[in-house]
Image: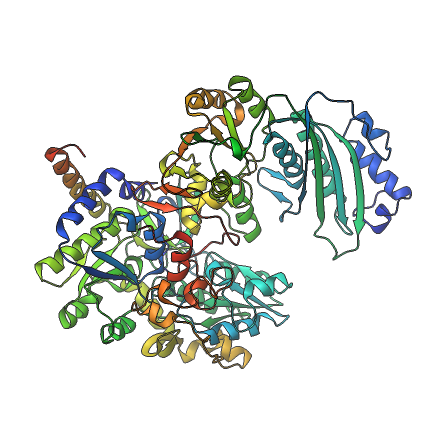
Amino acid sequence: MRYLDEFRDHGLVRPLVEELHRTVDRPLRIMEVCGTHTMAIFRHGIRSLLPEEIELVSGPGCPVCVTPQGYIDTLLQLARQPDIIVATFGDMLRVPGSGGSLAGIRAEGGRVELVYSPLDALALAREEPEQQVVFVSVGFETTTPTIAATLLQAAGLGVDNFSILVGNKVMIPPLRALMNDPELHLDGLLCPGHVSVIIGADSYGFLAEEYGLACAVAGFEPTDILQGILELARQVREGKARVANCYGRAVRGSGNGRARQLVEELFMPADVAWRGLGTIPASGLELRPGFADFDALHRFGLSMARSPEPPGCRCGEVLRGICRPGDCPLFGSGCTPARPVGPCMVSSEGTCAAWFRYGDSR
Amino acid sequence: MQKKTITLDHGSGGVASQELITSLMLNHLPDPRLHRLEDAALLPAQNGRLAFSTDSYVVDPIFFPGGNIGELAVNGTINDLAMQGASPLCLSLGLILEEGLPLDDLETIMAAIGACCEAAGVPVVTGDTKVVPRGKGDRIFINTSGIGVVADGVHIGTDRIREGDAILVSGPVGDHGLTILAAREGIDLGRELQSDTCALHRLVQDLLAEIPAGLHGLRDPTRGGLATTLAEMARAAGLGFEIREEDIPLQGVTRAGCELLGLDPLYLANEGKCILIVEAAAAEAAVVRLRAHTQGRQAACIGRVGGSSPGRVILRTRAGGSRLLEPLFGDPLPRIC
Amino acid sequence: MCLAIPMRVVGLQGGRDDLLDPLVAVVEAEGMQRQVRLDLVDRMPRPGDYLIIHAGFAIHTLDSREAEANLRLMQEMADALGEDGEP
């Protein structure tokens, strides 16, 4: 596959690895904040290639992991209603709420449809006008524009049986919150490649300028990730923090204005809760009053449930990068992928799930 | 009688049942033993050990690109016998039909079963049909059991696997699992993607003729895919397996579909492939022999038995890194993250 | 939230009506063909261009010059390594 395979070429990976080993001369703590980066790193065995000195930490970049228990419970409440079809990305299907999951409801005969695109959910609504279709609107800046475009089409077509349960979040406020956390020590940030397609590499400037954090925007293939890590190592060694765009084929400094504009038409910033991190101002989105009809809470007269987090779970600290999965007392004993307690184990790219499945190959 | 769907009458043992069996079952299954419609089929005495296997098929959807539940039921049980090194003799066919199943669908499935049996040279010699009320079954469930003969001297099992053995796979992986997932969830990945369902007994017999003592381990990577089956074999053998990602055959469309949906083809089911663990010295000849066969055209050596993690499978990735291949838990799901 | 892959544009379809017949690109990779919406893309693609596809939409027209430049840079590193001694 073009523009994929070349960036996995072992012949190009090896020199990067060697250069990285030559460049790193001190312990480095690097965080990535994208579930897709977490998965790619494990899938390609990147950790086994890195010098001992590099510690790779996962931050709150897994949208499933940071979705509060209350959102899931509200979703399940909707899914249990006989005239509602819940349409969801696969990522959310098995996430357990306080009592059950979408997968469980589907097994019981409830209508839960798996979709690849929000457009499929809209198509479903048009095919089944007698049913209400609720789309599970979870994701960061890469996904939100696709939902906005879908809603705009729904509005234009006058589709009246389609709504979304809004759980969309944005990356910059939690990054600032992380940097203000005195417990967190980081040398560099591997910035999420596809979020950056939308928001632009320039968005991370404040991290370098105000916090002296080395930043590298990286794609998802092995050479992309290694180039990003190498760039961070170089910045630290030179003592010069900046934002380097290592994913130029996809990311521009200014990002994708058209996509952002579309989002702004439908959504506005909101203070939302992040599982394990509490409420972060302006870190989420809500629908503008003109589109309130498409808000499932508004349509069905509900308010978002507020559910307590499970006791003993250290997901919050794992998500903030200050605790390793192995340090959580529940890891592997009370909390496993088959019977997850917290979000980091629930999502297949959650830090704990990834550790459990792929093992720490060092 | 021209009813369009299965009714409870069809399962009652009366006229409707008889008509169903004669017009829909026997029509497609020519073996005379079956046509006698006796309570049991008699088989002649055999030379060699008997292998006996059973499997039930409940796949949803029952029709998918490349085949239907009928083909899976025939090929699946033939393959289970083949994985023991057996030459399949015959099959039984048990059907549980849900009231309301369209007769046309049943006809299509029966025709597929008949065609599969004929192509494989393995007849259905005994069968049974039951009907359950609407809602008590998922259109159709099929059970097939099979008997085969294992020639003297043939001994395939994880206890024969040795350090240094070569690990082969008979062809590209992940096609069936991706086809089913896409069909079930309504994701269109194009016409090129099809189930790989096929019977492997001749492939295995050919190979045994070529390297009679050299075939140590043999399994078909169905549910859980290549990775799960390798993990099970490694654990059973108590030896490490080292696999090279770049040597694993993959069809382009399967690869592309997996990249699009965030799926790992190594964990998707196969219905026409096998993992073969062969003596190192015989590996090259084995690959040549497999590739000479229609079902083994893309056979490849994908790794070796050995390494420093006994009982575990290590994958050397295309990028040169390494990761553990653990058994699958939970069905693979598409993701956007 | 970032799973997106590059696919090649083989044609453009639709566009007669934003709502009923929106503009889509027909994209292809290794024999798999899909249709993707172009509502979000910042530069309209031409056949032969590559699009980065996420959840049924193109989010970016891949900059092939940047891609080639990056690959060249890495190839130079690889060549330099080769000169220093066999890997």
Q: Position of residue A148 (x, y in %)?
A: 40, 67
Q: On the picture, is B287 further left or further right than B102? A: left
Q: How is the image coloured?
A: rainbow
Decide which of B141, B192 is in the foreground and name it: B141
Residue sitting at 77 percent across and 22 percent down? B45
Image location (x, y in percent) of residue A26: 14, 57
Disc tally is 0
Q: Is residue A252 visible?
A: no
Q: Which quadrant of the rendered structure holds the N terminus of chain A?
A: top left
Residue B115 drawn above or below residue A236: above
| Residue positioned 32% across, 68% down in the render | A323
Quarter of the view holding residue A131: bottom right
Query: Please, is residue B36 above or below residue A340 in the view?
Result: above
Left or right, C24 with respect to B126, comes to left
Res. B258 in view: yes
Above or below for A141 versus B139 = below
Q: Residue A192: give x, y in percent of width and height.
A: 28, 60
Q: Could you say which is closer to the camera, residue A149 or residue B97?
A: B97
- Name the spot of residue A105 as percent of width and height, x first: 60, 65
> For the point 51% across and 69% down, which residue is it?
A158
- Quick one: A231 or A246, which is closer to the camera? A231
Q: In this rendering, would A7 be left or right of C29? A: left
User: Seen from this angle, which residue lies furthest right?
Assistant: B14
